[in-house]
């Protein structure tokens, strides 16, 4: 049986997520530990979390969680707070009068801070912000069980909502005048799009397309030399696919005719041998 990964709480969270992600309306999938994992997935990606778990490599997980600039020491604090939450919840199962669990609020604030770090240092899509907020334990949550749990657990049911709004408003990224960030034309062609199609995309749609390009070529977007890595990946892609033509129309016609004649001759020989 596999041992603990990071700590008991995170191990429980990731095991519950993997066992229940096909049943998204279930109680376990919407339990606090799994919701925390789903919030991490919104900020980062499922691969950033699941791959290190499968490889049993905690250092890689921490590196992934720090890729937008969130400090490693705060990542350790987050895991400690998550474990502290889980310890109190396990103890409360055997108590008639439940102990307050302050880590219910603390852990969610840690996750909001991670999101803000990404917003300030990288880029957040509106759909990511919306998805993240809808997973928080606030009176606005769509899941009635999560709303109920918030009322039962939080001293102030609006605390997380207010913290999220305050942090989003007070941390803005100072950007230059918006310009569309086009990648190498060939990268879009490989993905099946022409530049005429790409130029019709909005800035947000283009950002999503660029994410797809880097993901396709397995290039980390926080790499300092990502443009160079993309160029080399495209060169390797094209090099491994031999051209279907010689580049000379007349020669290509002769090649095609030669193939046709060969097929006809082989067919004639087979027919003669059989009949």
Image (cartoon, helix red, strand yellow):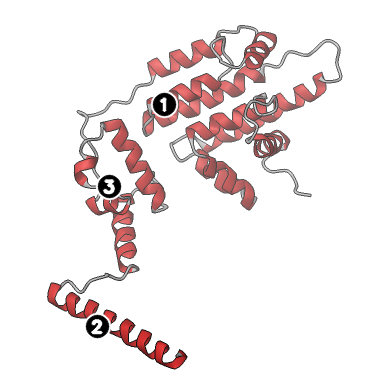
Q: Residue 193 carries which label?
A: 3
Q: Choose between 268 and 173: the one closer to the eye.
A: 268
Which label's residue is closer to the chain start, 3 or 1?
1
State the image coordinates of residue 113 (x, y, percent, origin top left).
Answer: 49, 25
Q: How far apart are marks 3 and 1 (CA)?
A: 23 Å
Please state the horizontal and vertical placement of residue 269, each as a whole percent of the image.
38, 90
Residue 107 placement (x, y as % from top left): 61, 24
Label 3: which secondary element: loop
Q: Is residue 206 above or below residue 218?
A: above
Residue furthest to the bottom = 273
Check disc 1 and report the residue beneath it. Answer: 127
Q: Which of 109 and 50 is in front in this view?
A: 50
The residue where tag 2 is placed is 258
Taking the spot 54% from the left edge, 40% from the top edge, the residue there is 46
Residue at 73 percent across and 43 percent down: it is 4
Q: Residue at the spot x=46%, y=41% of the render?
A: 67
Q: Looking at the image, is mark 1 or mark 2 earlier in the sequence?
A: 1
The answer to whether residue 219 shows anywhere in this view is no
Which comes before the other along the chain, label 2 or label 3? 3
Whether residue 148 can be seen here = yes
């Amino acid at each position: 049986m596999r041992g603990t990964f990071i700590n008991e709480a995170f191990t429980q969270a990731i095991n519950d997520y993997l066992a229940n992600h096909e049943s998204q309306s279930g109680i376990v999938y919407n339990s606090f530990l799994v919701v925390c994992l789903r919030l991490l997935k919104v900020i980062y990606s499922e691969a950033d979390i699941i791959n290190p778990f499968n490889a049993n490599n905690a250092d890689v997980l921490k590196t992934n969680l720090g890729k937008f600039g969130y400090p490693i020491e705060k990542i350790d604090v987050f895991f400690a707070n998550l474990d502290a939450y889980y310890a109190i919840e396990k103890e409360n199962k055997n108590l008639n009068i439940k102990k307050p669990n302050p880590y219910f609020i603390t852990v969610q604030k840690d996750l909001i801070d991670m999101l803000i770090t990404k917003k300030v240092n990288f880029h957040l899509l509106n759909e990511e912000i919306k998805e993240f907020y809808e997973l928080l334990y606030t009176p606005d949550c769509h899941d009635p069980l999560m709303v109920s749990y918030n009322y039962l657990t939080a001293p102030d049911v609006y605390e997380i909502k207010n913290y999220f709004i305050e942090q989003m408003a007070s941390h803005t990224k100072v950007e230059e005048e918006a310009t569309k960030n086009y990648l190498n034309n060939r990268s879009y062609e490989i993905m099946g799009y022409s530049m005429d199609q790409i130029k019709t995309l909005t800035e947000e749609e283009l950002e999503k397309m660029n994410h797809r390009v880097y993901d396709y070529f397995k290039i980390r977007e926080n790499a300092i030399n990502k443009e160079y890595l993309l160029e080399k990946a495209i060169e390797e892609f094209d090099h491994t696919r031999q051209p279907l033509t010689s580049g000379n129309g007349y020669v290509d016609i002769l090649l095609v005719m030669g193939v046709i004649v060969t097929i006809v001759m082989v067919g004639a020989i087979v027919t003669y041998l059989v009949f």
